[in-house]
Amino acid sequence: MRREFDAIVVGAGIAGLYMLHRLRGLGLSARVYEAGDGVGGTWYWNRYPGARCDVESLDYSYSFSPELEQEWQWTERFPAQPEILRYLEHVADRFDLRRDITFGTKVTRAAYDEAAGRWEVRTATGEEASARFLVMATGCLSVSKRPEVPGLERFRGAWYHTGHWPHEGVDFTGQRVGVIGTGSSGIQAIPVIAEQAASLTVFQRTPNFSLPAHNGPLDPETQRARKANYPEYRRRARESGFGIPVEPATASALETDEEARRRAYEERWRRGSLTAILTAYTDLLVNREANETAAEFVRGKIREIVRDPEVAETLSPRDHPFGTKRPCLDSGYYATFNRDTVTLVDLRKTPLVEITADGVRTTGREYAFDSIVFATGFDAMTGALTAIDIRGRGGVSLREEWAQGPRTYLGLGVAGFPNLFTVTGPGSPSVLSNMMVSIEQHVDWIAGCLAYLRERGLTAIEPTAEAQDAWVRHVREVGDLTLYPMADSWYMGANVPGKPRVFMPYIGGVSTYRQICDDIAAKDYTGFTLSA
Ligand code: NA7
């Protein structure tokens, strides 16, 4: 049976849930297809020990419903995965969203039927559906990546990827465990696994900068005060660079004397925040020498915490400027390497060779494990979109269109793919921001666009090739003004072999970006072709 809707949404994470709510508000019929058996997206899958958001709970929450904002009580400053998932389940129930979501159903193909002006969608379970509008709410970090080493099928122990953690949890008590990868997921999981395991071996290819989260129970007074003033606070978040209100920097790091700079970094290190150090000075993300002052401050902290100087040096990032890979927020990461049971292996010195029946072999030696944890990240930003066979006008494949890197207009739409919307797509601030703020902005913009089309009796919208070219150029030019392209990061697609090296997110800032999107809407969607 082929079902017909006004809109189909792919994904029931933070973006898909809110999109469904807004579509209903417009009186449109909608269906959400979700691969998981429950809502939550990222927070449904990433159940590894220590999984926690690096944005504070009072910021990482929807703003669209004042009632929801007031009634939900957060317990921790930085929410752990189970609490965020409970929150999203509550949202699904509170707004009665589940009845329009088909769970356990992966979308495999979506093709635009030009004659009908509709998207034909197919799922892995054989379901077929059609809709005028297709909204991809597939997430930026949802397709996990295994390391490119052979032999996993031989391994006799158990193995896990942080991004697809067993729902029943894993008890590592008494085990010999190996963790491969020291990004945010590894850095969160390692201290928790170290507490359980008999021994833990950490395989590090590139050291990351990590800052202490200083997490703890959320002070009730802080929560009450924020809730009393939420609208104003949310406004400031929307008008900020990263979607989190901060005092903008006014001074240059290079023009500040060393002692004052050290005090400023020290004070910001104690705050526990992703952006505190990054936003201390105006030049940290644009000038390598300025950046080095912050980088060296963090390296100094690593040397203070880690007792073995050689281990401290191996943990100290020198290959990329501070902040050009998303910094991590940890709870006891560096101190974990002071445990007798924890060993750090530098894959730069002894690269991975293969997974063996017993464990992991590097060029140095073989390590035997009961369990291996892959904290090796994701095919970020484009992976979930190119995993689906998306066909636009003339049967053109999105995967092929993006073979040299993603091309979008505003990260919201793609030329040649009418009525396709990408929530937090490449070319939007998304992963460089508080995702909640960026997701709500995109969903609101899409809902506004659909209302506009309906009011004028229009049925199709599509970016022009010229507007898209100009936007792609702008995203690149703004990125090139910063130090970001210097890092082999997932922002650059550099973590996936063969992926084109393109700085994918828009670094112009959440506030500037919102202004651009709003102006375009106010000017009757300049850069888009609208038709009936
Ligand atoms: P990340 O940040 O991409 O980290 C993945 C880690 O795995 C990183 O240390 C990688 O080293 C390492 N890795 C990947 N492939 C390999 C191979 N083949 N060999 C050895 N090591 C490898 O993913 P996360 O899940 O930690 O975090 C993703 C985001 O989620 C994070 O930024 C937050 O925004 C939330 P590399 O650096 O590539 O040398």
Image (cartoon, grey):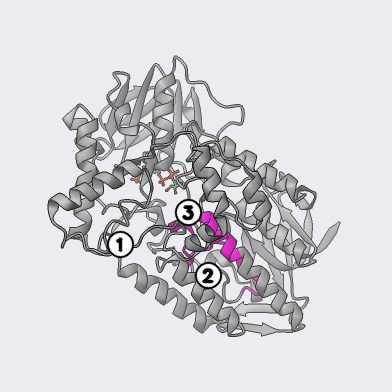
Q: Read off the residue under disc 2.
A: 401
Q: Is mark 1 within 8 Å of ligand 1?
A: no
Question: Which of the two labelled residues, at mark 2 and mark 1, occupies the earlier sequence position?
Answer: 1
Q: Position of residue 340 (x, y in %)?
A: 29, 18
Side (left or right) of 16 relative to 487:
right
Q: Which residues are magenta?
A: 417-442
Q: Nearer the viewer, mark 3 or mark 1?
A: 1
The part of the image, by quadrant, that contains residue 507 is bottom left
Question: Which of the two labelled residues, at mark 3 and mark 1, occupies the earlier sequence position?
Answer: 1
Secondary structure at numbered mark 3: loop
Q: Is mark 3 within 8 Å of ligand 1?
A: yes
Q: Give the residue type at disc 1.
A: Ala
Q: Say which quadrant the N terminus sits in.
A: bottom right
Residue 249 is labelled as: 1
Does 466 appear above or below 304? Answer: below
Q: Nearer the viewer, mark 3 or mark 2?
A: 3
Q: Residues within 10 Å of mark 3 (few under 14, many from 20)?
A: many
Question: Which of the two labelled residues, at mark 3 and mark 2, occupies the earlier sequence position?
Answer: 3
- Furthest residue toward right: 1
Secondary structure at numbered mark 1: loop
Taking depth in this image into account, of 528 and 239 the one nearest to the observer is 239
Residue 93 is labelled as: none
Q: Read off the residue under disc 3.
A: 380
